[in-house]
Image (cartoon, rainbow, N blue to C red):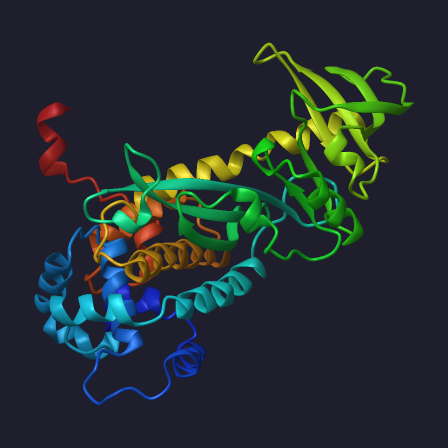
Amino acid sequence: MSHHNIVLSQLLRLVPRHEFERLAEQHDGKRRQGSMKRWTQFVALSVGQLGGRSSLRDIESSLAAQPSHRYHLGSQSVSRSALGRANERLDFSFYEALFARLYQQASRRAPRHGFALPEKLFSLDASLIDVSMKLFPQANYNRMKAAFKLHLGLDHDGLIPAVATITSGKTAEIDQARLLRFPPGSILLFDKGYSAYDWHAELTRQGIHFVSRLRDNAKYEVLERFPVGSQEGVLGDEVIRFTSLRSSRKDLLPVRRVVYYDAETGHTYQFVTNRLDWPARLVADLYKQRWQVELFFKWIKQNLKIKAFLGLSPNAVYTQVLVALCMYLMLAYLKFCSRLKQSLQEITRLLQLNLFMRRPLLELFRPPDKPATSPQLTWGWQ
């Protein structure tokens, strides 16, 4: 019988270890002898994410029950106190760098988005992560609750997170969007929470295209109208210039307004974009894909651990959320490379059940062989 390392060990090989250690040296420098290493912290938090562990004690117990596997994982022994200190003190920016590296790795194998467009397609959005106001007073959101906010740019090639930042819940989406950088030629999809006309104009100057919703109270004048033709659902297509007092003080560029009636919902939508050459129906179809980022937030909150936190400092919270995003990228990379047919949710469930089993990783996702029919079992039914 061939020997196999545990499933967790095989999965962690998807993280280039030499690059991991190089990033750790860049961010942490030399640390005292005997302190918890970055790799050990990452292994422990991976067990928490993929194993569904909800506390430091759970993670400690899970790893303590598998002492013979520590060599193959390349980690130290883990105590809940040491892991808690590491989460509080080791700068979360290391996991931002690891996230960026894993995104580059996954994006090279990701399937393209479904549009006949050469440009990269991204959706921007943010989601609140509710926490206890008593435990996290620094994350005060309003009088009723406390929250952190996950700001995300979703790459529609493979539907994987491309950029991510975590802030306090009060941080406005547009403030973080101004700090993000996307490749020239990219297409950004975002809702009315990002309606800052000067930022839209800046995106145009950077060579970045966008599709968004127009504010209901927007003031503008029509510069040019395009024929609608036979495009299904399209009610209007025109070039406009914003005319409010605040807009007039800024060097804004004309944009395109598309009015679209969605027969499925019975609602009429006004879209705005800086692309004048696309068919109007394409503008509406592109914006519909923004819903994928909402589905991403729903998935990660349901399947990974970003609701109950292992520390009470912002650093511990940011670390845990970023590790969850790293896990998502690793699972997506595994799916892309191995061309697995299972959904990411099915992959996550199978890994959770077999995390410390000794068997080939990809064998988990193959359908079981049909057992040979035994005449002794079927004789009585013939």
Rendered location of residue 289, percent (x, y): 59, 34
* Quarter placement of the C terminus: top left
- Locate residue 222 relative to residue 338 in the image: left or right: right
Image point (59%, 33%), residue name = 191
Rendered location of residue 353, percent (x, y): 21, 51
Rendered location of residue 24, percent (x, y): 39, 79
User: Please, is residue 281 above or below residue 352 in the view?
Assistant: above
The part of the image, by quadrant, that contains residue 331 is bottom left
Image point (30%, 51%), residue name = 138
- Locate residue 334 relative to residue 363 in the image: left or right: right
The part of the image, by quadrant, that contains residue 214 is top right
Residue 367 visible in the shown view? no
The part of the image, by quadrant, that contains residue 314 is bottom left
* Quarter placement of the N terminus: bottom left
- Locate residue 367 relative to residue 85 in the image: left or right: right
Image point (56%, 13%), residue name = 265
User: Please, is residue 137 above or below residue 232 in the view?
Assistant: below
